[in-house]
Image: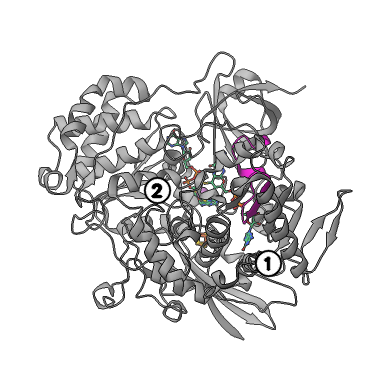
């Protein structure tokens, strides 16, 4: 029996597991003991990875749609030639930017990089990722406040903090291993605080729950900031030495007195003051946020309002502190730095001459071959297809027909495409319904590459199972198209994921995310390595859990963090007489993953969750409307669509609010085309709706 250590490629923890293999079958998957993230534990999704051994039927080949709508199976070489030919043809007819890609936060760092090289550099196409639906807000917030997209914390901080504040985050369901770290916190009298309109599973397990009115976080955070300043609960030394624009911020938050905060958040003045005291009394206060913050119409400013609180109280860079953005997908962090979409490989601007020269040198190509600007955003790509400007789309490892906001707009868009390539481990996903080409690729158990987790830890995915004939990986599929496009020498040095990793290491040199001290070999069977890890400085970075900003130095030109703030805006989509309720959306249970293509195979999930779409409704509201448990209702959305759901009655959502798990396609039929102006992340969590009985 062989034992192979690899990485779980669901959530951002990147737990490691030991896979025991006999005759090319996984017989046992055991969470790796001693691995700093999950040390012998993991959740049901990781334990069920062995179900994904045969997703692609052995010998699966690409499929191309014929005129009559049926599919023809072709060889891989024919598949590559077809896609390359079509991409070229469309670009010649409609211009370079008439082809686009939508990528993901769930592939390997090397797969992002080569997709970015082929699509963004060579073809000059736009490629955005599903990370736009997830982390874009935190990315923009970090860049503006810290000067680089660098979350500074380490998971150990959850064990060292005396005041742990979760804002719009539900780790009990979404990040169970992270929640496990909270449970290991031994600091006497430590407090767990949850800010969430819903009494989430995490709120139920917390010491304090602040059930504010949906979308009122920014108002609450400015009110809290004003109180902290008025009471002089701030760290003058830190503010003076390590931040900029505090005086302006101080003036600005004077417009947020206690009464205004209480009126707009639905919390009492006492509750707000209690929260202020909790922050003040904490010696090591840590703030943690996720999608309840990132997915809103003023999300970036909300994330920065959290950062501002940490800065002004000096709760950053020290053990157990920080304004900490929790990442979602297993390699969102790899995508953020190496997909060549928002920034160059390893970070930096597409227009910075020094960066251009450096990247061109490492890749051995002409400067003119590199992408010239950040990509168009996800919504612009979908809008571009509708407008007839984009005619070719290649998506991989994401299922937007289900997950994109207002998802009928995706369905109608793709009908207009001349080329629609879907690359996935299942051909049954909703996004493949309309594809013109399907590329079947192998799942994580059969490939190799690098993942970066939420605390900047690189870890190795190593092949657990051998592949059959014709089974290829995402990396090889992208490389195949690149070769068929005639990239020639521009693909020199990109032959294998390992080669690509070496290129990316070089690209990262002297950047904040420098990984030049990490080698492919040193990641295999390792404890993972957090960036930065520059070559020659391995000794000083030896510690297994490291955080950033301990020296009070940030990545801005002045090395000081910035207070960034802006007036609270009126909700562009308020409830009304016609749409009196708010539909909140999010994760349903630990065993369910997004669009459920993978977790539907998990026995446990089948047993405990419903097969049909459902939502949670408050007991009072259900009573008032005469709705019984599991009755089917119709929900009509402000976006003009409607969908049916079974009702689960609960007191954990409040009167006037509904909560729908995202794991059913009906959920995003109802969400609006509304985005944060800076990050262009969809506002998924607060859609005005009305409820109708179905007779
Ligand atoms: N089991 C499981 N785990 C997952 C995933 C999965 O699909 N399944 N997905 C992974 C991914 S990619 C991500 S991004 C993470 C997401 O992780 P989380 O963000 O923790 O999960 P969500 O359920 O999307 O939303 C968190 C909370 O935001 C709250 N919220 C809604 N509106 C507001 C508001 O106005 N203010 C505040 N303060 N809170 C609000 C919701 O009520 C919800 O409890 O989970 C990751 N982990
Ligand atoms: N209403 C609402 N909508 C949301 C959210 C919300 O909170 N509310 N959250 C948003 C967030 S945070 C996210 S991250 C998105 C997620 O949305 P998606 O990315 O669309 O969801 P997934 O189901 O994770 O899709 C991943 C796809 O990759 C495939 N896959 C798995 N492994 C591989 C592989 O190795 N190679 C390839 N090529 N394919 C593979 C799977 O079969 C699946 O089809 O949803 C967003 N949508
Ligand atoms: S916590 Fe996340 S990384 Fe760990 S096993 Fe579960 S899904 Fe995988
Ligand atoms: Mo996500």
| Residue 61 in sight in this render | no
Please state the horizontal and vertical placement of residue 348, each as a whole percent of the image: 37, 56
Does label 2 or label 1 sit earlier along the sequence?
A: 2
Identify the element where label 1 is drawn. helix
Please state the horizontal and vertical placement of residue 432, each as a whole percent of the image: 73, 51
Q: What residue do we see at 11% from left, 42% from top?
A: 236
Please state the horizontal and vertical placement of residue 556, each as a whole percent of the image: 25, 50
**535 relative position to 573: left or right:** left
Residue 69's place in the image compared with 568, above or below, is below
Disc sitting over residue 484 in the figure:
1
- In front: mark 2 or mark 1? 1
Identify which residue, 221 or 161, lies in the foreground.
221
For the N terminus, the quadrant is bottom right
For the C terminus, the quadrant is top right
Q: Which residues are magenta?
A: 391-409
Identify which residue, 458 or 69, lies in the foreground.
69
Please state the horizontal and vertical placement of residue 16, each as a whole percent of the image: 49, 70
Disc sitting over residue 139 in the figure:
2
Q: Residues within 10 Å of mark 1 (few under 14, many from 20)?
A: some
Residue closest to the far bottom: 1
**497 relative position to 261: left or right:** right
Identify the element where label 2 is drawn. helix
Residue 160's place in the image compared with 68, above or below, is below
Whether residue 403 is in magenta: the answer is yes
Q: What residue do we see at 46% from left, 79% from top?
A: 525
Identify which residue, 445 or 158, lies in the foreground.
445
Identify which residue, 319 or 477, lies in the foreground.
477
């Amino acid at each position: 029996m062989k034992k192979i250590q690899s990485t779980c490629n669901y959530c951002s923890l990147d737990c490691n597991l030991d896979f025991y293999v006999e005759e090319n079958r996984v017989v046992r998957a055991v969470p790796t003991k001693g691995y700093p993230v999950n040390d012998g534990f993991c959740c049901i999704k990781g334990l069920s990875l062995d179900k994904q051994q045969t997703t692609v039927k052995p010998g699966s080949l690409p499929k191309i749609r014929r005129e009559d709508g049926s599919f023809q199976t072709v060889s891989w070489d024919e598949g590559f030639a077809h896609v390359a030919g079509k991409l070229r043809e469309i670009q010649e007819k409609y211009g370079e930017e008439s082809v686009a890609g939508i990528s993901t936060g769930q592939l390997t760092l090397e797969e992002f990089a080569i997709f970015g090289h082929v699509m963004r550099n060579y073809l000059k196409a736009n490629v955005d990722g599903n990370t736009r639906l997830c982390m874009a807000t935190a990315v923009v917030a970090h860049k503006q406040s810290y000067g680089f997209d660098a979350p500074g914390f380490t998971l150990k901080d959850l064990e060292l903090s005396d005041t742990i504040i979760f804002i719009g985050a539900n780790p009990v369901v979404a990040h169970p291993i992270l929640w496990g770290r909270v449970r290991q916190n031994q600091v006497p009298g430590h407090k767990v605080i949850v800010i969430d309109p819903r009494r989430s599973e995490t709120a139920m397990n917390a010491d304090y729950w602040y059930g504010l009115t949906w979308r009122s976080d920014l108002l609450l955070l400015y009110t809290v900031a004003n109180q902290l300043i008025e009471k002089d609960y701030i760290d003058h030394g830190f503010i003076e030495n390590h931040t900029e624009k505090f005086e302006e911020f101080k003036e600005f938050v004077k417009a947020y007195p206690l009464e205004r905060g209480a009126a707009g958040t639905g919390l009492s003045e006492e509750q707000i003051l209690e929260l202020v005291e909790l922050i003040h009394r904490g010696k090591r206060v840590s703030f943690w946020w996720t999608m309840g913050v990132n997915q809103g119409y003023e999300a970036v400013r909300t994330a920065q309002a959290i950062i501002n609180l940490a800065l002004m109280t000096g709760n950053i860079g020290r053990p157990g502190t920080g304004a900490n953005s929790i990442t979602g997908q297993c390699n969102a962090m790899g995508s953020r730095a190496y997909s060549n979409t928002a920034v160059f490989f390893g970070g930096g601007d597409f227009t910075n001459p020094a960066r251009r020269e450096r990247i061109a040198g490492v890749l051995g190509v002409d400067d003119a071959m590199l992408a010239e600007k950040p990509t168009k955003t996800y919504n612009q790509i979908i809008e571009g297809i509708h407008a007839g400007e984009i005619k070719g789309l290649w998506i991989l490892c994401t299922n937007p027909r289900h997950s994109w906001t207002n998802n009928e707009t995706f369905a109608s868009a793709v009908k207009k495409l001349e080329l629609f390539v879907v690359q996935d481990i299942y051909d049954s996903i909703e996004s493949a319904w309309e594809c013109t080409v399907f590329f079947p690729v192998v799942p994580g158990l059969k490939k190799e590459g690098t993942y970066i987790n939420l605390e900047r830890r690189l870890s190795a995915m190593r092949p657990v199972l051998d592949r059959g004939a014709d089974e290829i990986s995402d990396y090889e599929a992208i490389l195949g198209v690149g070769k068929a496009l005639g990239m020639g020498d521009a693909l020199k040095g990109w032959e294998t994921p390992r080669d690509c990793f070496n290129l990316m290491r070089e690209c990262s040199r002297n950047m904040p995310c420098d990984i030049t001290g990490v080698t492919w070999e040193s990641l295999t069977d390792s404890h993972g390595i957090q960036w930065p890890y520059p070559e020659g400085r391995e000794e000083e970075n030896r510690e297994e859990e490291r955080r950033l900003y301990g020296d009070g130095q940030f990545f801005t030109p002045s090395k000081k963090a910035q207070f960034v703030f802006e007036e609270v805006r009126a909700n562009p989509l308020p409830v009304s007489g016609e749409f009196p309720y708010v539909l909140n959306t999010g994760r349903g249970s630990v065993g369910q993953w997004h669009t459920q293509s993978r977790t539907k195979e998990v026995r446990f999930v089948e047993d405990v969750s419903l097969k049909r779409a459902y939502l949670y409704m408050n007991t009072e509201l259900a009573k008032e409307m005469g709705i019984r448990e599991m009755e089917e209702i119709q929900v009509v959305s402000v976006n003009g669509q409607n969908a049916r759901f079974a009702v689960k009655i609960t007191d954990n959502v409040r009167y006037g609010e509904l909560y729908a798990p995202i794991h059913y396609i009906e959920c995003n039929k109802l969400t609006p085309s509304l985005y944060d102006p800076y990050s262009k992340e969809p506002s998924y969590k607060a859609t005005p709706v009305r409820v109708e009985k179905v007779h």
